[in-house]
Structures are given as structure tokens and as C-alpha cells.
């Protein structure tokens, strides 16, 4: 089976979702509360393979039962025995990647059916086949839904390591009837063993129970301990997988999940749809990578050609491992859920981001910075922004700065991220952006730039209070030594006498004007050569130090261009 389209209304956190699914492996990426798990829940509900689905008012969007829950799932690659006219045959429809869903099958189209699950205020789910040309829906039994093959790996991982009702191990067994017979035989043998055993404490308790019951008017003959066979039922998980004498349920979470997933896939078959919530849960990065590789393959190691895997993740390792075409970026705004995939023309741009900054794909408000200095500056400012905004860190709002790779790369990365649903801005460039600001603005991407075409270091050197300039110089001296820092400031000084020592006020009082001192510091900080390259703050860690200097100088920066740009960026982050 393969899911081609999903339409959801009024289910849990999803008021509306209209999503055409693409590849056989789909990884849902997004922030907490983006309704990623809700999408898996909706798929599971729409194809629920058992008779009863527990429902309450809280399963309705905003707990409003006046608007019914509706989940419509269009599926292809249907098992052959469901294609008969008395099954799904009269409700077949057509689907193509280019044209989407049409009401009738045809040449060049995949044959699909649409199953709708509806739940009204009576809290009784109904499943039916729908088709525009058929006046009446047709009921879909749970046994037919079970044949479609959907399996969910979630919080109940231990159940799939036991022979309990509906577990994956039961599907690998000859059948529930044969297992029930085995359990009956076990219960008879167990009853006989208990009957023959000497259990004095239990016999004493049984006698006390008889006497106490008689006082209340419930008279029995002799009571004795015995085995209640109802405890040995298929639904009670009395059989479980063991390694020697140790149940698998006592192993680590990651290992249990891998075992349960393997059993589920074997039990439901290669044509099934596997739903995996938080695929990384309990796994180290190397095991995540291995698992994702296996999920995308057939048994012989070739790319997957049967069934489908839909998973959620919060792990950058997943984004780093999977091709970008297998990621779907989930967003939820006022109840409307969207799942964006990357257009082919932007695949390379987003793929490059996933390779160098996979963590950024889990944010919501992304600042594509010209380089590492600006990334560090933003990070260094975050604690000060939190203080100014009732203690709320910008990270809680999904604020993530990332290195755009320069003025010709950053704009395209921002445009690509915008296309898949991120709120994006571009931060800083002392040279013209390519594409330019007009192209960015037309796409809804704002560019925050320092005025006068200055670099970050030059702008800050012009605007920081003298005491903060001294702090900046002290940071550079601690990193590179007094001799290098002073010599570089001297080399960029445009007038005599040249600076001596490392005290900024002494430079100004020694004859250089303050504007010339500021200009020399800014140029040295930007262009001065160090062992690690050009510039004093050209990596994220050093940029964070710069951000700390700026944050502490906030009061003294009031009214400057630096303060204006930073205030605009902070306002956007908290909007």
C-alpha cells in the first residue's frame, strides 16, 4: 500500500490539512506542536486496523464536537483480494503525480481508493469508501482495513515484543486461533500445577476470605487458591520474547524500538505503511543513520519499491542523513497544517543547508547570516533579548541563526527556505546581495543590513561607546596578543601620531581623532590577518563574544544605526 493523498478536518490540533504525499520514505520535520504526530494519528485513524477506536471530545479540534472529525486517505497499491466488485472495485479512482486525484481510473494513472473516517458528536467512528460518481459510500470493515497493512511504532513498543492482541508478533504467528489453543493448553497445565502445589499462606488467606464473605451473607464451600485462566488470555501478553531468561522489555529503549520495528515490518509485510513517531528516540546518531538507510531499502539493499514509511523526527541526524526530497516541513498556523516539500529547483540549496546546518531545519524563524561572525553575534545577543522580553529566550520561538555562506549564497538559501514555509530574513552584507534586495522583498524575505555599506565590525566600531570599544580590543588582545592587535590598528590608522599601547582613550588623547580611531579599529577587526585567517571575529565562538560586548553596551548604543538594526531584528524574532 502507498498513501497518495491525505485530507484532515477538525482532528486534534489539525483544523485542516490537504496534503499530496510524494516519495516512499517521508520524514516530517518541524517544531514541537507543529502537529507532526497529529498527522501520524490521523493516518492511523483513517486506516485503523481494528474494530474499535477510543474517542473522546478532546479528539475534536478545540474540543468542539459540533464540527465532525473527517479523515480522507487516498491509497494505492491495493491488495489484489480487495479489488473485487464486492470489495473496493466499484470505488476505484485514478491518481498521477502530475495531475493529482481524479474520480475514475484510466491509462497512465495509478488505481487508488479514498477511505473516509468520520466521527460526529456521538463518538462512533465510521469508515467508508467514497467516490463522486457513487451516490452512496460503502462501509469498510476492520478486516479489510487490516489487509491494507498499516503499523505504528509509538509509545506502546513493549506490546509488539509480546504475543498480545493486535501485536506484530501475532501477525508472524500462524494465527490468533492457533495461539489461543496453545494458551488454553498452557492454562490447563498451569492449573494442574497449582492444584498440586503446597501453598499454605494462600490457603490460610482463602479460609479467611470464606469466613469474611460468610459474615456479609455470601456463603461458599471450601475456598482454595487456584489459577484463573482468564489471566492467560491472548490480550494479556503472557508470552513475550526472551533472550535466555530475560524478557526483551527489560532492554534499553532504543534496542527495543529497533526490535519492535523489525517485527512490525516483518509481520505486516513489505507492502505495508509504517508510521514511526520520533524515529531517533533512544538511538545514537550512528544507529539513526543505519536505521534510516534500511528503511529506504528493499530486503536486497536496492531502493525501496514497495510500501511506505512516514516518520517524524527532531534530530538533525535525520535531516543530515536523508535526501532533502524525503523531508516534508510541517507548519501549523491557527489550526491550518501544511506539509511543504522542496521544489526541484531549490533542492540543491536546501540540501546544502541540511549538510552544513541541519539543526536550522527544525527552527521556525531563520536568520540567514552572511557569515560566521553574524551567526555568533546573534547568539551572543540572545540572552540580552530574553531579558528585554519577559525572560523568553528567542530560541523558544524557533529563532535560529545560520551561516549563509556569503553574499551570493545567503540570499538563495533564504529564498529556498521561504519556499518551504520558514519565516526567513537575511542579516548583513557590506557588499551588494545577489540576488538583490528587491528580489528578496518580492518573495517576502527582509534583508537587515548595516547602513552605509559597512561590515559588522566596522559598524560596531563606529557606534559602540568607548568603554565597549576597549572591551572589544581586550577580547582581541586575549586571543591574538597585544603586538598583533596594535600593529594592525596602526596599519589601518590614517593619521599620525600612530596608536601606542592598548588603551583606546590614550589613542584618542594622543592626537588621533575619535572617528579615525574608530575607523582603524573597525578595519583591523575586519581585515587583520590572524593564524586562523582574516579578521578578529570570523567564527561563531568569537562572534558570540562580540555579541556579548554589544549586548552589554545596549544603553550606550541608543540612537545609533547599530541599535536600530538590532532592535528591528529582535522585533521580528518576537513577532
Image (tube, rainbow, N blue to C red):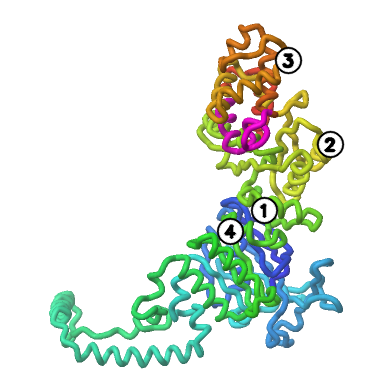
Q: Which residue was labeled with disc 1?
A: 354
Mark found first going from the N terminus, 4 or 1: 4
Q: Which residue was labeled with disc 4?
A: 313
Between circles 2 and 3, the one closer to the viewer is 3
In the rendered structure, which segment of residues is drawn in magenta?
Answer: 528-552
Quote the CA–CA distance across marks 3 and 4: 55 Å
Q: Which residue was labeled with disc 3?
A: 494
Residue under the point 27% across and 85% down: 227
Quote the CA–CA distance across marks 2 and 4: 35 Å
Quote the CA–CA distance across marks 2 and 3: 36 Å
Quote the CA–CA distance across marks 3 and 1: 44 Å
**Is disc 2 placed on a helix, strand or loop?**
helix
Left or right of residue 224: residue 129: right
Quote the CA–CA distance across marks 4 and 1: 14 Å
Residue 192: give x, y in percent of width and height.
26, 92
Q: Which residue was labeled with disc 2?
A: 438
Residue 191 lies in what quarter of the image?
A: bottom left
Mark found first going from the N terminus, 2 or 4: 4
Residue 58: give x, y in percent of width and height.
53, 58
Amino acid at each position: 500500500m502507498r498513501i497518495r493523498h491525505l485530507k484532515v478536518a477538525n482532528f486534534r490540533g489539525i483544523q485542516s490539512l490537504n496534503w499530496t504525499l510524494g516519495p516512499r520514505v517521508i520524514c516530517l520535520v518541524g517544531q514541537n506542536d507543529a502537529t507532526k504526530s497529529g498527522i501520524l494519528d490521523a493516518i492511523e485513524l483513517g486506516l485503523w486496523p481494528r474494530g474499535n477506536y477510543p474517542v473522546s471530545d478532546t479528539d475534536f479540534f478545540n474540543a468542539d464536537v459540533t464540527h465532525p472529525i473527517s479523515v480522507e486517505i487516498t491509497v494505492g497499491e491495493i491488495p489484489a483480494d480487495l479489488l473485487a466488485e464486492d470489495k473496493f472495485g466499484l470505488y476505484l479512482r485514478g491518481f498521477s503525480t502530475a495531475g493529482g486525484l481524479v474520480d475514475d481510473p484510466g491509462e497512465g494513472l495509478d488505481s487508488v481508493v479514498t477511505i473516509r473516517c468520520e466521527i460526529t458528536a456521538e463518538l462512533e467512528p465510521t469508515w467508508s469508501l467514497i467516490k463522486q460518481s457513487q451516490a452512496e459510500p460503502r462501509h469498510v470493515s476492520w478486516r479489510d482495513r487490516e489487509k491494507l497493512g498499516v503499523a505504528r511504532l509509538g509509545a506502546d513498543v513493549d506490546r509488539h515484543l509480546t504475543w498480545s492482541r493486535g501485536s506484530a508478533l501475532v501477525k508472524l504467528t500462524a494465527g490468533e486461533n492457533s495461539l489461543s489453543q496453545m494458551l488454553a493448553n498452557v492454562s490447563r497445565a498451569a492449573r494442574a500445577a497449582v492444584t498440586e502445589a503446597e501453598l499454605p499462606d494462600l490457603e490460610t488467606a482463602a479460609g479467611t476470605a470464606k469466613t469474611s464473605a460468610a459474615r456479609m451473607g455470601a456463603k461458599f464451600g471450601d475456598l482454595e487458591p487456584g489459577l484463573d485462566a482468564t489471566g492467560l488470555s491472548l490480550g494479556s501478553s503472557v508470552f513475550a520474547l526472551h533472550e535466555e531468561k530475560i524478557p526483551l522489555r527489560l532492554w534499553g529503549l532504543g534496542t527495543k524500538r529497533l526490535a519492535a520495528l523489525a517485527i512490525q515490518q516483518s509481520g505486516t509485510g513489505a507492502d505495508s505503511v509504517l508510521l514511526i513517531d520520533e524515529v531517533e528516540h533512544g538511538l545514537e546518531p550512528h544507529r539513526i543513520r543505519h536505521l534510516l538507510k534500511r528503511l529506504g531499502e528493499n530486503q536486497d539493499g536496492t531502493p525501496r519499491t514497495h510500501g511506505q514509511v512516514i516518520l517524524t523526527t527532531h534530530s538533525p541526524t535525520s535531516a543530515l542523513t536523508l535526501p532533502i526530497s524525503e523531508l516534508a516541513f510541517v507548519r501549523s498556523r491557527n489550526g491550518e497544517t501544511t506539509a511543504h516539500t522542496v521544489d526541484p529547483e531549490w533542492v540543491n540549496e536546501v540540501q546544502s543547508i541540511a549538510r552544513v546546518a541541519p539543526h536550522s531545519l527544525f527552527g521556525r524563524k531563520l536568520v540567514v547570516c552572511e557569515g560566521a561572525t553574524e551567526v555568533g553575534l546573534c547568539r551572543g545577543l540572545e540572552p540580552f533579548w530574553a531579558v528585554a522580553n519577559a525572560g523568553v529566550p528567542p530560541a523558544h520561538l524557533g529563532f535560529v541563526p545560520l551561516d549563509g555562506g556569503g553574499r551570493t549564497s545567503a540570499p538563495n538559501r533564504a529564498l529556498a527556505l521561504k519556499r518551504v514555509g520558514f519565516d526567513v530574513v537575511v542579516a548583513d552584507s557590506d557588499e551588494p546581495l545577489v540576488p538583490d534586495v528587491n528580489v528578496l522583498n518580492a518573495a517576502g524575505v527582509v534583508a537587515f543590513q548595516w547602513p552605509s555599506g559597512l561590515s559588522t565590525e566596522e559598524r560596531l566600531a563606529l557606534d559602540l561607546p568607548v568603554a565597549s570599544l576597549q572591551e572589544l580590543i581586550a577580547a582581541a588582545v586575549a586571543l591574538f596578543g597585544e603586538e598583533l592587535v596594535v600593529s594592525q590598528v596602526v596599519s589601518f590608522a590614517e593619521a599620525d601620531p600612530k596608536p601606542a599601547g592598548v588603551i583606546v582613550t590614550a589613542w584618542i588623547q594622543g592626537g588621533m581623532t575619535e572617528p579615525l580611531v574608530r575607523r582603524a579599529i573597525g578595519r583591523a577587526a575586519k581585515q587583520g590577518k590572524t593564524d586562523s585567517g582574516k579578521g578578529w571575529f570570523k567564527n561563531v565562538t568569537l562572534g558570540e563574544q562580540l555579541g556579548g560586548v554589544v549586548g552589554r553596551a545596549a544603553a550606550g548604543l541608543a540612537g545609533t544605526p547599530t541599535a536600530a538594526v538590532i532592535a528591528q531584528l529582535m522585533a521580528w524574532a518576537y513577532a
